Amino acid sequence: MRNEEEMLELILTKAMISDNIRLVEMNGSRVDSSLKPDPFQDYDIVYYVKDLQSFLRDHSWVDYFGERIVMQMPDQMVIPSADKTRQSFSYLMLFKDGNRIDLTLTPVTLAEECLRTKEPRKILLDKDNRIKLTSITPEETYLITKPDQKAFHDCSNEFWWVSTYIAKALWREELILAKSLMEGPVRDMLLIMLNWHIGIRTDFAVSTGKGGKYIEQYVESDVWKKLVLTYPDGNYENIWKALFNMCNLFEQLSINIGQELNIELPDYRNNVLDYLKHIEKLPKISEQIY
């Protein structure tokens, strides 16, 4: 497996010999010194170029980076559908030595606009010395933000409202729908609430990363154990248990956050919980809910 020095030399050499490539940015986990390095860290690279189309006429130019296991070009895909408004083009490449480069080509005219974001980044090459924005460290990235009452109530409403859809899908034995709702909007709201809980514990000075991947580092061990119990298998009884575990954890976090931030909790929580318990016990032959 090529090491970081070899990979960066490869990436920069390509940029230096091509007059079309004017600026090189690296972002993602490899510029975040707070993270423990591991062999799965991608090389998230942006080439800012004068003429984007010249690269797209023949995609074989990326063979320069090495033999691949697989490559994806998301900007020309119909499933999943590409963002037609996007002005960049990406090559996602997994190589036979285990390295991965996520390479994005962006018109250099958009560089200053793109580099206004606060995502961690490192400028590897700037041929024209025209980009005034410099590298950004992880400490300057998006951190957990303190919720106001509107955000808190919207999160609560989405969680409790969509949980009723899960109950309906479970009663109908619509497994895929029930799991999709649980791992989609309801899970998302639980993780948002969990992030706010972590924010209070850390004075809103940390990020839990993409998909909440660092949550375990910041929560109490008992909260983590409760969170783990919200991930069920495909058994209906276990999904019901996991749903109630989600509700109990969400309620615990909500009460704590409400007290800490002086936010009033919505009054329908117990109503929804009673409804979920009722649907769980509702006989399948029932013609009426109540």
Image (cartoon, helix red, strand yellow):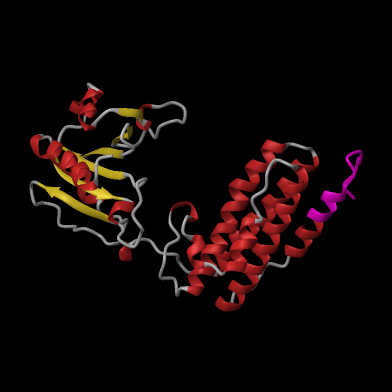
Q: Main secondary structure of the magenta part?
A: loop
Q: Is residue 217 left or right of residue 131?
A: right
Q: How many marks?
A: 0
Please state the horizontal and vertical placement of residue 21, each as a whole percent of the image: 14, 38
Q: Is residue 50 above or below residue 183?
A: above
Q: Residue at x 35, y 36 (%)?
A: 85
69 horizontally vs 111: left or right: right
* Residue 182 seen from this side: yes
Q: As displayed, is residue 42 above or below residue 202?
A: above
Q: Is residue 278 magenta?
A: yes
Q: Position of residue 221 (x, y in %)?
A: 58, 67
Q: Say if the magenta span includes residue 272.
A: no
Q: Is residue 264 left or right of residue 87?
A: right
The answer to whether 132 appears left or right of 82 in the picture is: left
Residue at 40% over, 64% down: 143
Q: Residue at x 22, y 42 (%)?
A: 7
Residue 116 visible in image? no
Q: Residue at x 48, y 52 (%)?
A: 211
Extent of the magenta region: 276-290
Compared with 62, 7 (above or below) is below
Furthest residue in direction front, as rendered:
1
156, 39: nearer the viewer = 39
